[in-house]
Amino acid sequence: MLYTELLRLWHEAVQAVDAKDWQGALSKLEQISEPTSCTLFNAASAHLVLGQLDLALKALDLTLAKDERLAVGFFQRAAVMMQIDRLEEALSDCIWAQKHMRGNLVIDYRQLGLRFKLHSWQVLYNAAAVYCRMGQWEQARETLLSASQEKGGGRGGTTEVALNSVLKEEILAPLLVPEDVVFRPRKQDVEQLQQRDFLGKAKVISSVIPNDDFGGFEPLRLQKPGFYEPKVDGTQDSLYMRVRIPYMARGPGQLTVPGGAMVFLFGEERRDGMASVIYDGTRGLLPMSLLDPADVKISKGKRENKVPSGIPLPPGLKPPTRPQAQASPAAPPRDTPPPSYTTATHAPLPASEPPGYTVNTANEQHVVAPQGPETSSVVLKVHYTYTVTLSVSLDTPFQEVKKCIAQKLGQPAHQLRLRLKIHLTTVPSSTKWWHCMTT
């Protein structure tokens, strides 16, 4: 169960207790799937007010199971035990309550949310009440005398009145935590349950478009290449104006505008009769007397043919495409097919000797053998998972070449297959490629 949900139900139950709605408080507490010792103690208090002693005792048992050192829980359960005549268990709870006070004369439970102070003399008073019900009047009187000698306030003459009652052999009523005193959640935690607007309301609009002074609010719209026109409420007057006659700029900040052009009006008319407008993506000044309101509610076909106005948007450019790989030149057709992999140079494995290494049929070795016209040896370049080179003489037999390659690659010679491939157009005729594969 989420702690926020537990906190909400706990707070609503406390509010019901303050309103004396004990049944409503129980309904809220029963909705808590993972109750704590504090919520269980509150449920026990509600059951006590409703006269449900058995349910109150059960709730207190669960409370002490959650917190076995809660002295006020033992104090409250001892009082309930006395009301249902389980006197020995009540006396035992008084002893446990005294033990869990750990020698303190008073325990203030306000830090845990319970506005109650448990005094040592109150525990002794309940123990004396148990002795009265057992008929042990002398033991009850001695216990009350010990309670009267305890330091600490809050008695107000209670022990003296109880001593007189014991001398008259009158049974004492047990002390209980007040019915409206329950565990309450922390005020700081309850305040966190209310939703907060951390972002607040937008006050300033910042635009990446130069000379953009538009200060309104409108929903996001898809921007298209062209000109951005601020949205105007239909109930307001149009801010688009049409220039009646051509105007030539006569001072700094003024615009040169042809007749009939559409401009967007910013602000109000100044004292000198000029108004700030935007035309063709540029902001400037025009005489207010030359501007007439323009009707922006025109058909779609006419809108496409009108003169662009407003604030220009950045140009829409397509992202660069992936460069096309150049196709390698095709090899010329050959008259004879390449030799088969199953050649006489391939020695099959003996049936009785399985290979002692992992077979890798996906690896291929390309052996390049460039031969110079004046040299008597050839340099072999083997392309494998790594590249190795070796030099052999021209008159070396094929099997010896194969053994040299196998020794260089660290592979058995009988596991290699070589294939001759000659490129007639790209390399000299003396250069040969031996393709080597492992099986």
Image: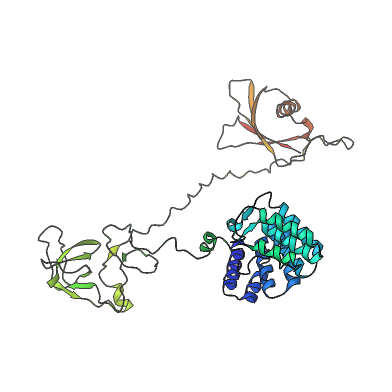
Front-most of residues 103 and 193: 103
* Relative height, residue 121 to residue 365 (above, below): below
Tell me: 281 left or right of 53: left
Counting every numbered tag in the picture gives 0
The image position of residue 226, as x and y in percent, is: 32, 64
Looking at the picture, how far across and down is residue 384, in whole percent? 66, 34
Quarter holding the C terminus is top right
| Image point (47%, 63%), residue name | 196
Q: Residue at x 49, y 50 (%)?
A: 324
Q: Is residue 288 above or below residue 328?
A: below
Q: Please tell me in which quadrant of the rendered image residue 89 appears.
A: bottom right
Q: Position of residue 208 (x, y in %)?
A: 33, 57
Instruction: Using the image as rendered, state which of residue 90 and residue 14 is in the foreground.
Output: 90
**Which residue is at 11% across, 68% downward?**
273
Q: Quadrant of the N terminus?
A: bottom right
Q: Is residue 381 visible?
A: no
Q: Can I make out residue 49 in this image? A: yes
Tell me residue 280's x, y (percent).
24, 64
Left or right: residue 238 compared with residue 380: left
Q: Give the image quarter of residue 52.
A: bottom right
- Using the image, determine if residue 427 lies above or below residue 52: above
Q: Is residue 176 above or below residue 334?
A: below
